[in-house]
Amino acid sequence: MAKEKRGIDDLTLWDDAKAMIRKAEAEGIQTVWDRLEGQTPHCKFCETGLTCKKCVMGPCRIKPDSEKKAHGVCGADADLTVARNFGRFVAAGAASHSDHGRDLVETLAAIGAGETTDYVIKDSDKLRRIAGEVGLSTDDKDDKAIAAELAALFTRDYGFGSNKRLSFAARVPEKRRELWEKVGIAPRGVDWEVVEMMHRTHMGVDSDAVSICLHAARTSLSDGWGGSMIATEISDIVFGTPKPGMTEVNLGVLKKDHVNILVHGHSPIVSEMLLASARDETFIQAAKSAGAAGINVAGLCCTGNELLMRQGVPMAGNHLMTELTIVTGAVDLMLVDYQCIMPSLVTISHCYHTKFVSTSNKAHFTGAEHVEFNYKNAREKADQVVRMAIEAFTERDQSRVQIPQGPMQMMTGFSNEAILGALGGTPDPLIEAIKAGSVRGAVGIVGCNNPKLKQDYVHTNLAKELIKRDILVLCTGCATSALGKAGLLMPEAASQAGDGLKAVCESLGIPPVLHVGSCVDNARIIHLCAVLANALGVDIADLPVAASAPEWYSEKAAAIGLYAVASGIFTHLGLPPHITGSETVTNLALGGLDDVVGAHFIVEPDPFKAAEQIDARIQAKRTGLGLT
Ligand code: XCC
Ligand code: SF4
């Protein structure tokens, strides 16, 4: 962290962000960067993971090099303290994705039981395909009956009702499953693993740093191949499997003459219903009567990604843009569910006419209006919210509105079904391209923004460096806005790729960076890796692939990174988690895990250096497969 005040050019890559940071400053509005400055320098004990407040004999601050303070009151040393903290950190991330997934299981069950008419099965083919895949018979059954059975099976997958492995573990190459069994990290239900992590990290339970780290890996796997994967697959079944299409990104997607509604958070359950209401002719007419030209819905963060993938709804921005959207003065209503919603958004919305509406029983925000959505009332509540937005529009002060430059175009919608579809239904053309070296490998660039890093600088430069080297990039989450704003999600960006990748993209008419969804949709990436590995008869760890969370901030991102590594995927992080106070845990993360699960983390804030290291790893994997 720079100690001196950072200039605006150190905060973000983008003109739309800079314009709004300046406006915020002029209007006396505090943003995430101001608050980061207030919190800097951070507490060194916390930053390195050496604070423990897990019991009331403490709190303890561990000083490894001090005779008197090297241990907490209970005797825990630096390694154990870091591991216990990290274990809980990962468990919280896994819990978040998976509790979101639980809402989808509930919705699917409600469809099956005939308890909702607001939600329906949009992709009946996928429902039947997934049901068949997990061993349910679909003969002579209607969609509702299959939905009910599938929801019941996924409910068991969450818990400890059956001691068997997760349904989707069957997707994992056999070698990998055997490795997980051998190491003791074969994932069980995510509810089980998360609760067990809380138990293990209570004072006086698991007191070995390595053992806790392995359980962290197991917990993350129960998210990746369990909760998150279930969330993705049910979202496709209920809202449709994404297909390629065009849309737009940046603050320019807001429209001065429209009612602007932003959806923020993660679950498509709320945002899809809002969109349906906003597209209803009755409300469009009501908006016109109120003096607007229409109703404009745009997304933020992951629920934005969900709508982007399936509905082509434009994206206003990623994590660090969320506050700045309101500063435009053009947002009439922000509708949120859960995760990554900075509480400051309520405060900032109160500086404008913006209505801030929470929807989830799990996520109340002091100062917000709460309109609770469930599967029985969702459409009615969405209608209510759209009416609130239209009313708010009439209170907008147009003299305070400033909307930066016009939006960038981008292509989205690359579900695995769409990717394989583009390849003619099998992974073979991709495998052939990898063998020939026209596509040397693939990297998932995922995750958040972090105000400690210049916004989107690491994302965009890393992606550009990789495609230059004929490495295909897949993106999800907040990386999407970054790469979209940089123009990399357009087929024309193929011209920035190496000759091999360029030719492949041009022949298929696709961009060199494919948008595959929200953060739970990282499950699509590990699934695709499994499909490739199975087709080649190798383990995931043998593939020339890698993952990167260049600007991550959240517990969820830690869970994703860890399930990627535990699945055998080499993973780059732009900054480290709070583990550097333990040599044992740090060494395990940065290398030791290679001997255990065949992959490890690297930490590198410089995108150019990170690209070198990722490239070297991909080349080593190519060599291992006998490729040049
Ligand atoms: Fe949140 Fe998912 Fe991170 Fe963006 S990328 S800041 S977790 S919204 Ni998931
Ligand atoms: Fe201190 Fe141990 Fe209690 Fe943690 S668990 S607060 S290290 S006494």
Image (cartoon, rainbow, N blue to C red):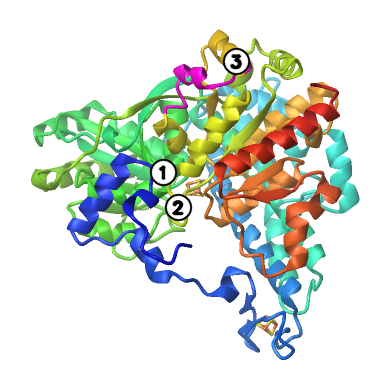
Q: Quadrant of the C terminus?
A: top right
Residue type pointed to by label 2: Tyr
Picture quadrant of ligand 2: bottom right
Under 8 Å from ligand 1: the CB of mark 1?
Answer: yes
Residue range highlighted in magenta: 487-500
Reading the chain from its start, which is encountered first: label 3 or label 1? 1
Circle 1/circle 2 CB separation < 8 Å: no
Image check: 240 left or right of 485? right
Q: Which of 493 and 317 lies nearest the eye of the viewer?
A: 493
Residue 495 among those drawn in magenta:
yes
Label 2: which secondary element: loop
Q: Tag 1: Cα neighbours inside 10 Å, few (<14), some, or many (≥20)? A: many
**Which amino acid lies under the numbered mark 1 shown in the image of this protein?**
Asn
Above or below: residue 490 compared with residue 363 = above
The percent position of residue 413, horizontal first and vertical second, equals: 50, 25
- Residue visible at 47% across and 17% down? 491
Q: Give the residue number, with chain letter if any, for mark 1.
A: 318
- Crowding at label 2, few (<14), some or many (≥20) Cα neighbours within 10 Å? many
